[in-house]
Amino acid sequence: MNPLAKQASANENPLRRDVRFLGHILGDVLVMQGGKELLDRVEKIRELTKQLRRSYDPAVLDQCKSEIRQLSPQMRQNVIRAFAIYFQLVNIAEQNHRVRRHRFYRRSEAGVVQPFSTEHAVQELKEKGMTAEQVEKALPFLSLELVITAHPTEAMRRTTLDIHHRIAELMMKLDHPYTTETEREEIRRNLLGEVTALWQSDELRRRKPTVMDEVRNGLYYIDETLFEVLPVVHQELTRCLNRIYPEKKWQVPSFLRFGSWIGGDRDGNPSVTPDVTWNTLVLQRNLIIRKYKEALQSLIKKLSYSTRRVSISDALCESLLRDEAEVKLEDVGQGKWRNENEPYRRKCTFMLARLHHTRTGKKELGAYRTAGEFIRDLTLIQESLRLHHADVLADHDLAHLIRQVELFGFHLLTLDIRQHSAEHEKALTEILGKLGIEERYDRLPEQEKISLLTELLQDPRPLTSPFASYSPDTEKCLELFRMIARAKQEFGEEAIRNYLISMTQGTSDLLEVVLFAKEVGLHRLHGGKESRLHAVPLLETIDDLHRAEEIMEAYFQHPAFIPFYHGEQPGQEIMLGYSDSNKDGGVITANWELYQAQLRLNRLAEKYGLRLKFFHGRGGALGRGGGPLHRNILANPDSALLGGIKITEQGEVLSSRYSLRPIALRSLEQATASLLLSTTTAVTNGHHELDPAWEKAIEEVSGYALEQYQQLVFGDADFLGFFNDVTPLPEIGELKIGSRPARRKNSQQFEDLRAIPWVFAWTQTRYLFPAWFAAGTGLGKYLERNGEKGLRLLREMYQMWPFFHSLIDNLQMALAKADLVIAREYTSLAKDSAAGERLFKLIEKEFMLTREKVLAISEQEELLDRVPVIQESIRLRNPYVDPLSFIQVFLLAKRRKEENDQTLADSLLEEVLLTINGIAAGLRNTG
């Protein structure tokens, strides 16, 4: 038996069986590629780390380090790759197990419903006494937009993800009950080939991806899974409502969409130019039209109905006559459908030609002007099919495609534009200076800025001239707004709706964007108020969150403010930044401030008759607001969902949630269930005030936690040097995983470090510092002051308040993944060993305190006792992650000593980067 695949269990469950099976295959590959010596070395190191896990012994630790030091460079690299690939295979096995469980529930007898499924949510509403009328009233308020981003948190190459996809599909075939022994052998041979391909492929990118590479990577998930899965999510909600509330015929609106930042997010990324954004929109349109053409070609095969057998609608007959007159078929390399008696196929032929002309932009040849025209043609076919009782095709295939067009239009994904507020201020300062209006706009106090902007917005004359010359940065700013105007003309209004303003610190930051929109005709106050580009503030720091009401009230009162409309309801979108607020104030304070900001801003919006759409800028990792999507939705105030909700989906989240259709369906079904429950509660119960006792308790906890966090991060002179020394931050900067720099400026200051590498670096060291630090002090000091009564209250909050429950559970997850024994090894890298030891002890003390208080509040003996699947997964993974951590520490120390030997330093860097990939796969978290 291959020792690498051993897992201690007498009763082997399907997941362990799959892990064992894939482990055997990897063992065979290791022997083929590196000989038995490689397998023996891997096994020896693994056994030593397992021994350390059972009982910490300094002698065993020294022996483990000695084994690592003795490895030759080639053997060391092979050992790293063996453990890293093992984790990739374990992750695939776990995904396959999720699919298996989902299918189990789908096959189960009536009454067995999967938790957090759509059916479970609708059933829960029924059991709570919600009537069909109450649920129907909530449906128009359902709105969830998931925004894919190109933040550099996906450490794996697309090539690697493709191999993973093929391995996952082969593993699913093994579950089929009718697979023969011969077929199983064939599957095993194919798996051996795929794992061999993993071993023989480069894990690391040899160059940083371009923005267009990132665009294509993002579109991969639409092409492979989401185009098909999104309509199924809507169909499932319709099915469940019809089954559980049969007294109504349900019509579910298109409530779940995907958007994108990739190609539109230029904050700190000079590579995102107006041309790149334009090319992104072209790629998106080309992809969606290709998908529609494929769908129509599939329909043509089924639409063989002949007018010699059936009668079609008059409306369809009339549309065919219009098509004959308007659509040129010659340019698309096809003539009319050869059989005149097959009207549906004739119609589809014209529709294919119209789609072709839409993609090429040749409107005069019969292109669709809008996606609505395409839907009208599909609806004509659908209604005509129903006349001769072809209802199955009408209600399934046609309905499916119509839903896809409603969701994706001709633009595929609405692209958000994002830029830093300072860029607009800088450009406007130059423009106003050249005009002699104001020499130093950037130095004006906020109120004077607002007064000047008000005058400029009310003046119908333009500020800029095509004959004036500006600096390259100002020209780029102006060209961006001109490009947005052209893009809306070419790709439709939905192609770009929102302009997000990073580091919004005053109302002037919003008005500057409105002024630039006015300059290109996207915002009009004279001759009828109209705004075609929505300015969206991004509130990122604790201070900005405190001032959010002041900023937004001045904007709502401003004569240039024009809301967007969702149906009849005027609204405003506001983005909340989880990454920088956490980096600024720590996990407890950041989450509480974000929650409070939603409550306060909602009350403000009600005062002005507005609904707010909150855009949650969550990262994949726990230190950046990560965690399960459905629990993140539940953790928001119910009333904050009534204007719709947007959430970023980043990095490893994309591949883990959306690379396989069954996993994508399950993830989105869970999100739908949470959204439906929260929204229906909010619509039915109205504004629900937070329990004052809960509010007072979390406010007190947050105050203590903030003081502890900032005292260390900002107040300790040794901390920043410690962070730079003991983490692989400099090496992460060399990992070619994103087109964007790790820092906003070429600066070593803490405030200029992006939150992503901050979290990524701490995760690699197993500290997971941003995800839990200071929580123990916050909870501990509160309990010191309030005793048993305080503990009862925190337990009540954990049981009854989804926000607090989610907060404590995320702390649990972070503490379970963190490992201070391993973290101590990284502390040895500190240049100032005394300061390093002092800071380690401080962090260790806080870790133990946080663990103690979390266990007391959640009433558990051990972390994650109530989620044994995750608890077991972490327990089984740790002995395999530990060797990579020990090797990484050894390599970092060696590389930093060899800085003068560039060749050796570069060779060691490659090995460090391999360990970074492996640890990321092992912990299932990066940034």
Image (cartoon, rainbow, N blue to C red):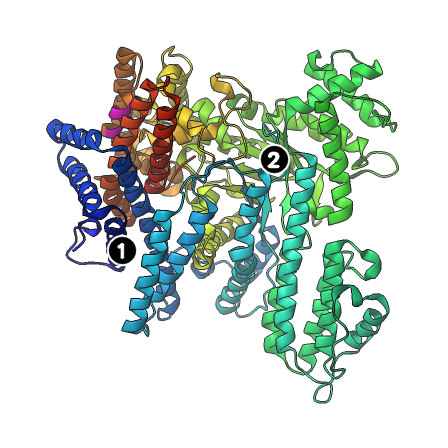
Compared with 162, 299 (above or below) is below
Q: Which quadrant holds residue 877?
A: top left
Q: Is residue 734 left or right of residue 535?
A: left
Spatial CA span between label 1 and label 2 = 42 Å
From the top left corner, tell me how far across and down residue 483 is, in percent.
Answer: 74, 37
Q: Which of the two residues, 258 or 237, is positioned nearer the viewer here?
A: 258
Q: What type is the residue that disc 2 sits on?
A: Asp
| Residue 122 - label | none
Which of pointers 1 and 2 indicates the residue nearer the eye?
Answer: 1
User: Magenta includes 825?
Assistant: yes
Crowdedness near tag 2: few (<14), some (14–19) or many (≥20) residues, C-alpha within 10 Å: many
Residue tagged 2: 265
Q: Is residue 310 left or right of residue 434?
A: left
From the top left corner, tell me how far across and down residue 22 is, in percent.
Answer: 28, 55
Q: Which quadrant holds residue 132?
A: bottom right
> Which comes before the other along the chain, label 1 or label 2?
1
Q: What type is the residue that disc 1 sits on?
A: Ile
Q: Which residues are magenta?
A: 822-826
Quadrant holding the N terminus: bottom left
Residue at 84% across, 22% down: 468
Quadrant holding the C terminus: top left
Q: Give the mark count.
A: 2
Residue 592 in view of the camera: no
From the top left corner, tell me how far across and down residue 884 is, in percent.
Answer: 28, 35
Secondary structure beneath dot 1 equals: helix
From the top left corner, tell me how far across and down residue 188 is, in percent.
Answer: 30, 63
